[in-house]
Each structure stands twice: as structure tokens, then as C-alpha cells.
Image: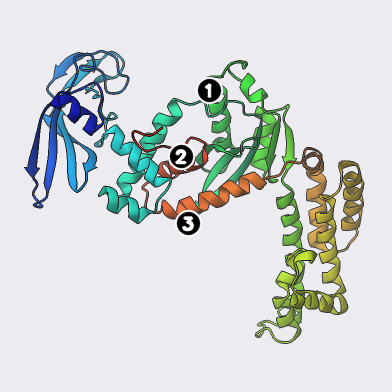
Amino acid sequence: MQARTVWRRLLGVEKTVVEDVEFVEELDATVSLVAHVRPTSRAASRCGKCGRRAGRYDGGEGRRRWRGLDFGEVLVFLEADAPRVRCRDHGVVVAGVPWARHGAGHTHAFDQQVAWLATQSSKTAITVLMRIAWRTVGAIVARYWADTAAALDQFAGLRKIGVDEISYKRGHKYLTVVVDHDTGRLVWAAPGRDKATLNSFFDALAASSPFTGETAGEDRCGLITHVSADGAEWIAKVVAERCPNAVRCADPFHVVKWATDALDVVRREAWNTARGAVTQRRAGRATGVAKDLKGARWALWKNPEDLTAGQATQLEWIVKTNPRLYRAYLLKEGLRTVFKLPLKQASVALEKWLSWARRCRIPAFVKLAKTITKHRPSILAAIEHGLSNGRIESVNTKIRLITRVAFGFKSPDALIALAMLNLGGHRPVLPGRR
């Protein structure tokens, strides 16, 4: 085997001619291996963006280097000329090279290994092992996912989706995420939580190339059969406009959370009354009954079957001392029970619960009854089809962990790319592995 072939395989490059290899002492006294390379005649003189043949424009800014995978302790660089070409679509651009992406300073193999490590390792491990900055990891992950997404149909077979938002940064910075109910994978995410953001998902869905058996254009939005979400008005309006035939399902977890929030309003009212915050200009510290009410929060929030012995005792104390608060607790539990029943029984039970809530004389639950009435069809649809945002909440939990790892990335695009690589069903593999 010729030496050039051996070097080409060691460097992990294709369509490349290895002209020479040398060891160079860098400014920091480390020794690097520098491979002088050039594209083969068939791969040369191509646009760096589209890959088409293009005429030479000039020599560019001379020779440049690309970082390759290390050889043990030795840093590896590929060095080559970087001429410019004139593309009929993109104008004057730097000529593409077969060993790296356009505009990148690292080889394909280097990018692939960093992307794999980003889905498997800690921030510190990646930066120390690969000897690069954390922001460089973000840039590599973003461009690796861009190439991966371009070769995939992320929306293939999409029928049942869940929509939710998640905070990724302080200052009310949110991501809108869309998850496939059938596979549990993350199919789309973007910064923002408004109608424009969700519309951009349906725009991407409509513009995507369908796989066999589907038709192009807006018909692909019409293939969505079920959409689960919380009660956010901006989600409901966009879904009604873009997927008018889809069944909209209200997430049971969020519906019960509304009741829990209403219950906590009643508990705080009782607590403020007990500590004198209603009748006095300046209330003192919570003592006695007020302190007991403050400590009873978990006894009221948790499911009865999950209560500890101490919390069960606290609940019994509320039954005897605060009938209004206990009635609010029963209303919360009554709504939670509705989601455990079959559709026919649940419909009857929900109607009875609404009648009870409307005349309970607890403002927080009277208001909640109006909200439940508004979302009644989607609540019953969730019970009928057995859909919830459970999968979405699971994905959100994983995104929160990824967010902590991704702290320090310059833009949310790198975070989204890392989330898609982890949760999109197409994880990278190590170079040379299947």
C-alpha cells in the first residue's frame, strides 16, 4: 500500500491527495503534525455552498489549516490552498474542500466526534479531550445538526403531536417544542412562545418534502390527526387555523394544575386571614393556625394515596378547622377523578363537577369553572383518545438537563441542535463506526 493511501486513511479523508506530511513546532512549544493536502481533480473548483462546478476567481487569502482528529498526544492539522471561485448562484465564495464543511475550521471527522461526545459526555470532558473552547462545541453541534436535518425528513409519518413551551434562560426566554406522540421523539423546536413561532412550525411542515404516500404542500398539515397542549390560547388558535380537522386534546396534567392553583389561592386567603393580613395594615409573622396552614401546602397538593402520616394528620385538621378550604380541596380531587373514568362516565362526572364549582361560592373555583367550560370539548377528547402531554413533559425534563450542559452557548440555535441530536431519534456515531 502506498504511503499516501495510508496517510489518507489515517487522516479519515476522501477525494483528497496527501502531498506531504511534516512535524511543526508551534509557538507554545507543542509539536503538531501538518498534512499538506489538496482536493482531487474531480473535487476541486467547486462552490463551497452548493458543491457545483465553478470557475476560479482568485487565490483567496493563501493557505489555511483545518483541525483534524488527534494522533494520540499529537495535534493534527490539514493545510491546503483556499482559492475563491465564482458560483452562478452564490457569487464569489471560497472553494469547497471534501474534508470539511464550508466555513468550518475542523474536518468532518472532528465535527462528528465532537457531536457524538456532546450527546454522551460532560462539558468539561469534551473541552479537555478535544482541546477546544465550549463555544466552539456549540458551533460544531449547530452545523452538524444542520447537515443531518438536511438529509432527513423529520416530519415523516407525523400524525399525533404534542405542543408545549419550556424556559431555557432567565428573562422569560422560552422554546416552543413539538413532539411526536407515536415515537416520543422531538421533531421541532424554536425560540419563542407565540402564534408566530408555532406558525413557523406549520410553515416548515407544509414546505417539507413528503415521503411516499403523502402529497405536498398544505395537505401535510391536514394529515395531523391529534394535537395535545395546555390551554394556551395562542396554541389553540394556530392549531384551529392550520389543522382544522385535528382533534385538540387538553393535557390532563395542566387541567388538574389549574385546580391546584385555585386551591392554593384559597389556602393563601385562609393563611392571610389567620395571620391578620386582611384586617391589619402590617401583619406579623405566621404563628399558631397561620403557621399550620402554611405548612399544610403539600398535604393539600399531593394525591391522597401519596400522603405521609403527618400530611394525612394535617388534612384531618383542615377538615375540622377550615370547611371552606376543605371544600376547595374536594373540588380539586373531584376534577382529578374525572380523568380516571371512561368517557361516558367522565362526561357525566365533569358536568356534575361544573355544576358544583359554579355554586360553591369560592371565587377561584367559580372562575375555574368558566375556564373548564371553555375547554370542555378538548378535555373530553383527551379522555376519549388517551392523550396527554406526558411524553412532552418527559422531553422537557431532558431538555432542562441539556440546557444546564449547554450553558455558555452563544445562541439558542446551538442548544436546539444539541436537543435535536439527543432527542430527535438520529444520534451521531463515532467516525468510522456504523
| Left or right relative to 51: residue 329 | right
Q: Give coordinates of residue 344: x percent, y percent.
A: 91, 42
Does dot 1 land on a helix, a strand or a loop?
loop
N-terminal-most mark, 1 or 3: 3
Q: In the drawing, what numbered circle is on residue 343?
A: none
Answer above or below: position of 377 versus 20. below
Looking at the image, do the residues carrying marks 3 and 2 touch, with CB atoms under 8 Å apart?
no
**How far apart are the alpha carbons under marks 3 and 2?**
24 Å
Of the two numbered discs 1 and 2 on the same chain, state the one appearing first in sequence.
1
Q: Residue at x 57, y 46 (%)?
A: 395
Residue type at mark 1: give it.
Ser
Distance Cα–Cα, label 1 vs label 2: 19 Å
Residue sitting at 65 percent across and 28 percent down?
242
Q: Quadrant of the C terminus?
A: top left
Q: Position of residue 175 (x, y in %)?
A: 52, 45
Q: Check whether the beta carbons of the residues at disc 1 and disc 3 lie within 8 A of each other.
A: no
The answer, for residue 275, to whether it is visible in the render is no
At x 38%, y 38%, the residue is 142
Q: Are marks 1 and 2 in contact (CB under 8 Å)?
A: no
Label annotation for residue 170 = 3
Residue 312, image x, y percentages: 79, 74
Category of crowding for the residue at label 3, using alpha-carbon neighbours closer than 10 angstroms: few (below 14), some (14–19), many (at least 20): few
Q: Nearer the viewer, residue 82 or 67?
A: 67
**Numbered circle sitting on residue 421:** 2
Q: Locate residue 84 relative to residue 115 in the image: left or right.
A: left
Which residue is denoted by mark 1 in the rendering? 208
The type of residue carrying mark 3 is Arg
- Give the spatial CA distance, label 1 vs label 3: 33 Å
For marks 3 and 2, the one nearer the N-term is 3
Q: Nearer the viewer, mark 1 or mark 2?
A: 2
